[in-house]
């Protein structure tokens, strides 16, 4: 079953520089990277960004395979985007290929290529963040970075808490799904053959017990949390304190430099 | 009166009734006084109100009638809620549904964090409580990869990190295999003996109940028997009448007595039982 392959929020423990950076730095770097990605307009800019990512993956030692694996679920979206861009980008001059209603221009190929590159880089860098940062640190960092929003009365603590509990229960629920599935299969349920409607129907005896059990768990967890004196974010302290080190400032400067470099490369107008 | 840590006074409770039905008393006049430092087991068949009683001991539920005091604090006093909950820690049946974080030490830190303890003190509390339950070397592991017994010990450590004076455990071994059960029971006993923590252990297992200092038997929301396990288990008929069994040793001696022998019923351990039989055979 494909359940065990879910890489969402998966973390590869390690001690590389990328692992040791403060999680807030990493989130900010991700933001810089995404901004730069949307600024890039030509091959030089994209080249710079791709090189940066390759460098980061090498430093993190998670391996290109793991990064590519993250791409699997969005494969169709990527292909779809590519085809749309290829077909519907109008260009000047002669189309390269003209066949029935299909006209492909040089501009189309260029846009499609960059678009695919952009999506792939976007996903890869996001995965790189979750691969190198433990979920708990990630939520801590988010809570800290979004601290400003707390002043606007947004429930930042609650959101961070929800996220970390969701992450905590993903493996438990996956395990449970597996168990229910085996139990239903033993009773003759068939999840793998038949058309789409058939398979969707087969999911009902899986989802119903799963939901019931999830609600019961939520109930018990809420009581257990209350027993441990949980009363919201007010007056709460954290065992693990986040601290910026010298390397964080350097990394942030480099991130900023990347944005500037990409912006400058637009002015050069190569390709 | 600091020797009594938990005290209920004619405690009654009923869950809100469904429409058209009459509310039934789940707890029906429970008077219980638990001494600080003791190890009390609570026995009772399904639905006798054990879990409901447990939830009254740290103000998860509030009495419909009567009072509950936790080291002198009335649980109905909302201002003392946190003080009450840090005095009485609670451990439940399913370890999976009490662990909140995906790293062992982070989970242990949850209680003290909620209480606003400074970070370096939390570190110490977490390390200490993980050492008490013998899970210190697993502090950086993910809980979902541990065994049931280990998970339950993590849950106990999470409660201990709040430095409670009393721990209430509601069937903590019900979902565990025999090895896990033994691990958890050893931990609980050590807690009581070396840390001086008052333990209230709700259980279905006679052999677990037999190890307590004091045994409380519940039926239909009432306490029907209360005393040292040796005495309580002698009331074989009364226990059987409310759907409970007695330890196998007592059962054996009881059956022999029904055959006309005259054996003492206070032999809980295998050794005591063997000794009693040996004395009988020697006499003949
Ligand atoms: N949340 C609830 N709402 C309504 N009724 C409840 C609720 N929880 C328990 N009850 C009822 O209260 C009675 C006592 O339940 P309780 O859980 O205290 O028993 P117990 O002794 O812990 O049983 P078990 O050995 O099964 O854990 C039962 O009849 C049960 O149906
Ligand atoms: Mg119960």
Image (tube, rainbow, N blue to C red):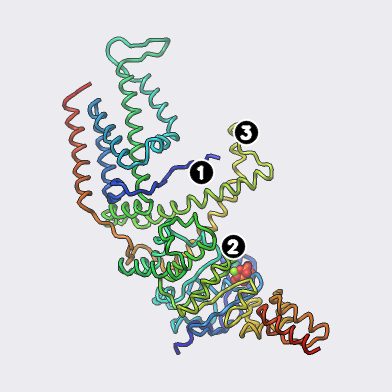
Q: Earlier in the sequence, mark 3 or mark 1?
A: 1
The tag on residue A4 is: 1
Q: Secondary structure at mark 1?
A: helix
Would you call the spot at circle 1 few (<14 residues within 10 Å), some (14-19), or many (20 or more)?
few
> The residue marked by circle 1 belongs to what chain?
A
Q: Nearer the viewer, residue A201 or B151?
A: B151
Label pair 2/1, CB-CB below 8 angstroms: no
Query: In the rendered image, which quarter is residue B158 located in?
Result: bottom left
Answer yes or no: disc 2 within 8 Å of ligand 1: no
Asked if badge 2 and badge 1 are on a common chain, one would say: no
Quarter of the image for the N terminus of chain B: give it: bottom left
Residue at the (75%, 81%) spot, across then down = B253
Quarter of the image for the C terminus of chain B: give it: bottom right
Q: Quadrant of ligand 1?
A: bottom right
Label pair 3/1, CB-CB below 8 angstroms: no
Residue at the (17%, 31%) spot, across then down = A264
The tag on residue A193 is: 3
Vertical arrangement, residue A143 with respect to residue B9, above or below: above
Q: Is residue A38 rendered to the left or right of residue B130?
A: left
Asked if badge 2 and badge 3 are on a common chain, one would say: no
**Residue matched to label 2:** B175
Q: Position of residue A242 (x, y in %)?
A: 28, 57
Query: In the rendered image, which quarter is residue A200 located in?
Result: top right
CA gap, disc 3 and disc 1: 20 Å
Q: Nearer the viewer, mark 2 or mark 3?
A: 2
> The residue marked by circle 3 belongs to what chain?
A
């Amino acid at each position: 079953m494909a359940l065990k392959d879910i890489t969402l929020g998966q973390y590869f423990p390690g001690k590389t520089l990328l692992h040791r950076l403060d999680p807030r730095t990493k989130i900010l770097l991700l933001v810089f990277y995404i901004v730069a990605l949307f600024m890039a307009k030509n091959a030089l800019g994209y080249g710079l960004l791709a090189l940066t990512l390759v460098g980061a993956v090498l430093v993190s030692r998670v391996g290109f395979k793991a990064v590519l694996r993250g791409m699997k679920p969005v494969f169709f979206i990527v292909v779809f985007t590519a085809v749309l861009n290829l077909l519907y980008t109008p260009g000047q001059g002669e189309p390269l290929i003209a066949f029935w209603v299909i006209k492909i221009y040089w501009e189309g190929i260029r846009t499609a290529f960059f678009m695919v590159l952009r999506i792939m880089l976007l996903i890869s860098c996001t995965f790189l963040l979750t691969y190198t940062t433990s979920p708990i640190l990630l939520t801590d960092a988010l809570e800290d970075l979004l601290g400003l929003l707390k002043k606007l009365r947004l429930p930042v603590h609650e959101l961070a808490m929800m996220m970390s509990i969701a992450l905590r229960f993903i493996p438990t629920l996956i395990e449970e799904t597996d168990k229910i599935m085996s139990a239903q299969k033993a009773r003759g349920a068939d999840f793998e053959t038949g058309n789409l409607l058939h398979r969707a129907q087969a999911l009902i005896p899986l989802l119903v017990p799963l939901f019931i059990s999830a609600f019961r768990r939520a109930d018990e967890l809420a009581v257990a949390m209350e027993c441990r004196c949980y009363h919201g974010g007010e007056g709460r302290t954290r065992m693990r304190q986040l601290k910026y080190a010298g390397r964080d400032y350097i990394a942030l400067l480099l991130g900023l430099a990347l944005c500037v470099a990409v912006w400058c490369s637009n002015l050069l107008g190569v390709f | 009166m600091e020797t009594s840590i938990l005290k209920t006074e004619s405690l009654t409770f009923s869950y809100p009734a469904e429409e058209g039905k009459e509310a039934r008393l789940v707890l029906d006049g429970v008077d219980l006084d638990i001494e600080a430092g003791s190890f009390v087991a609570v026995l009772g068949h399904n639905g006798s109100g054990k879990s409901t009683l447990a939830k009254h001991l740290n103000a998860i539920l509030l009495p419909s009638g009567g009072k509950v005091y936790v080291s002198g604090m009335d649980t109905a006093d909302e201002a003392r809620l946190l003080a009450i909950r840090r005095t009485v820690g609670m451990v439940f049946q399913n370890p999976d549904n009490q662990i909140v974080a995906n790293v062992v030490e982070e989970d242990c830190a949850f209680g003290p964090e909620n209480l606003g303890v400074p970070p370096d003190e939390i570190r110490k509390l977490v390390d200490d409580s993980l050492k008490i339950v013998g899970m210190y070397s697993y502090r950086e592991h993910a809980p979902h990869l541990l065994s049931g017994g280990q998970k339950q010990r993590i849950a106990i450590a999470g409660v201990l990190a709040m430095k409670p004076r009393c721990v209430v455990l509601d069937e903590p071994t019900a979902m565990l295999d025999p090895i896990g059960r033994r691990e958890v029971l050893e931990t609980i006993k050590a807690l009581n003996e070396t840390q001086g923590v008052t333990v209230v252990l709700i259980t279905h297992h006679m052999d677990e109940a037999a190890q307590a200092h004091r045994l409380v038997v519940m039926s239909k929301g009432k306490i029907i028997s209360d005393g040292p396990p040796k005495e309580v288990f002698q009331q074989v008929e009364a226990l059987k009448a409310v759907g409970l069994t007695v330890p196998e040793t007592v059962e054996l001696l009881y059956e022999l007595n029904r055959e006309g022998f005259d054996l003492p019923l206070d032999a809980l351990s295998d050794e005591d039982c063997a000794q009693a039989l040996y004395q009988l055979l020697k006499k003949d």
